Image (cartoon, rainbow, N blue to C red):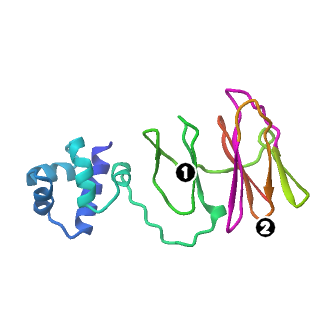
Amino acid sequence: MDSYVIGNMIRTLRKKENMTQAKLSDLLNVSNKTVSKWENGKGLPDISLLEPLSKALNVSLIEFISGYTVVNRNTSANIRRGQWYVCPVCGNVVHSVGSAVVSCCGTTLPPLEPAECDQDHNIHCEKIDGEYFVSVSHPMEKSHYICFIAYATDSCIQVEKLYPEQDAFCRFRIAGHGKLFCYCNHHGLYERRI
């Protein structure tokens, strides 16, 4: 945790809640000077105060620790423009339609920026029997492989989790124009429009 970021977060949220330093200090059973120290980046709250502090400031604990709040201004967002997150520890795959703070295995995950397909990460797609047959020509070794392939349209998403030493292909029900995504555990996320 960065004391400057947390201090700024406490000050901003406290003011948003129309709360004085004295009121916040009373809620947490600490002194006014302690709250002032936090807000000026000269100290951090004790770990036992993080949850009560986030509740008092009306924000989730993950948002509080990360240093920014999530405001979803578009509740009917387009799925194919969503954000992808992959945990480097357990391989958990998360897709979010709007802004999110995602944490897994004790790590706050950054949203992945998809790159256009390249020679080593080329997503092949053909229509077969009313489905998309999707494959990626990529080694599927234990240390270097494609973790998942996904197909996203404006209204739905289909994800196929892949594992080392299996072929990198899958079939998706055709649901309209959209994007195909694949995630390489070494090089990141790639996309292709279909």
177, 15: nearer the viewer: 177
As displayed, is residue 31 above or below residue 162? below
Quadrant in which residue 78 is drawn: bottom right
| Disc nearest the viewer among 2 and 1 | 2
160, 114: nearer the viewer: 160
- Quadrant in the picture for the N terminus: top left
Residue to which mark 2 is pinned: 176
Whichever of callouts 2 and 1 sits on the residue coming sooner in the sequence is: 1
Q: Where residue 24 appears, x then y in whole percent?
A: 15, 59
- Horizontally, residue 148 falls left or right of residue 170, namely left
Quadrant in which residue 8 is drawn: bottom left
The number of numbered discs placed on residues in the rendered structure image is 2
- Horizontally, residue 39 falls left or right of residue 92, namely left
Q: Where residue 141 appears, x then y in whole percent?
A: 73, 27
Element at label 1: loop
- Quadrant in the picture for the C terminus: bottom right
Magenta-drawn stretch contains 143: yes
- Which residues are the magenta region? 136-161
The residue drawn where x is 71% and y is 40% is 162
The residue drawn where x is 53% and y is 63% is 98
Q: Where residue 168 appears, x then y in whole percent?
A: 78, 40
The residue drawn where x is 42% and y is 39% is 106
Q: Amino acid at mark 1?
A: Pro
Q: Where residue 149 appears, x then y in whole percent?
A: 72, 47
Residues at badges 2 and 1 in contact (C-beta under 8 Å)? no
Residue to which mark 1 is pinned: 111
- Horizontally, residue 77 falls left or right of residue 167, namely left
Q: Amino acid at mark 2?
A: Gly
